[in-house]
Amino acid sequence: RIKLLIQQNIGGVSVPPVGPLGLFLNIIDEQWAIPINEAIGGGMMRTYIVDNHNDERLLNELGRSCGERSMRLIIRKLNRPRYNVSADKPRGYTTAEDAVGVTSDDVYNALVDHTNFHTAIMGRDFDEGKNAIRSLPPGYRVFLRDGSKLWKTNGGVENFVPASGGPKTPM
């Protein structure tokens, strides 16, 4: 319903908003569907991008008028070229960026800025994830097919969170 309201009020915004972001994503290989959702986050899939604070206010008003208490919005200049992040990508690993097609440069840039999806590594199982974490510097995260997550802190502590949402444990 919010999408229809936005279309009906498009004249009120300075730049048409982009969203929800999930509409601009296509999973390339279904085996990575769960880790992609973990890496990007379900909330991000429902997010809209607006160009400025005035457009943010209008979208929030439209959202409230159809029962949305709080719209998920990112404010950033729209219609910018796609980032070149190839230097940041880990070599030899499949990342969320590799596993999902993004049909909008604005959405791609927001995913880089807000989720670092270009450095989120997809792993088949715990051993593959552990090997990746141990071979890479801190800052990289590994998302496994079952939804588990591994990462290493700047202090070198390796962490694991199981798919069940259980407690974080050192590896």
Image: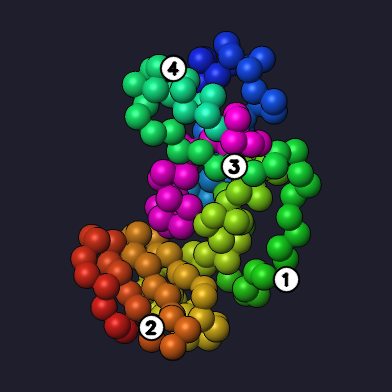
Query: Which is in the foreground here, disc 1 or disc 4?
Result: 4
Q: What residue appears at the point 52 percent right and 57 percent down from the top-left corner?
A: 115
| Foreground label between 3 and 4 | 3
Q: Which residue is mark 2?
A: 158
Name the amino acid, label 3: Ile
Q: Which dot marks residue 75?
A: 3
Which numbered disc, 4 or 2, marks the residue that appears first in the sequence?
4
Quadrant location of the N terminus in the rendered image: top left
Picture quarter with the C terminus: bottom left
Q: Is residue 34 magenta?
A: yes
Spatial distance from mark 3 to mark 4, Cα to Cα? 21 Å
- Which residue appears farthest toward the bottom when viewing the image? 156
Q: Position of residue 59 (x, y in %)?
A: 52, 26
Mark toward the start of the polypeptide (3 vs 1):
3
| For residue 138, above or below residue 115 | below
Q: CA distance from mark 1 to mark 4?
A: 40 Å
User: Closer to the camera: disc 3 or disc 1?
Assistant: 3
Q: Which residues are magenta?
A: 31-55
Check disc 4 and report the residue beneath it. Answer: 1
Mark 1 and mark 2 lie on one chain; the one further toward the N terminus is 1
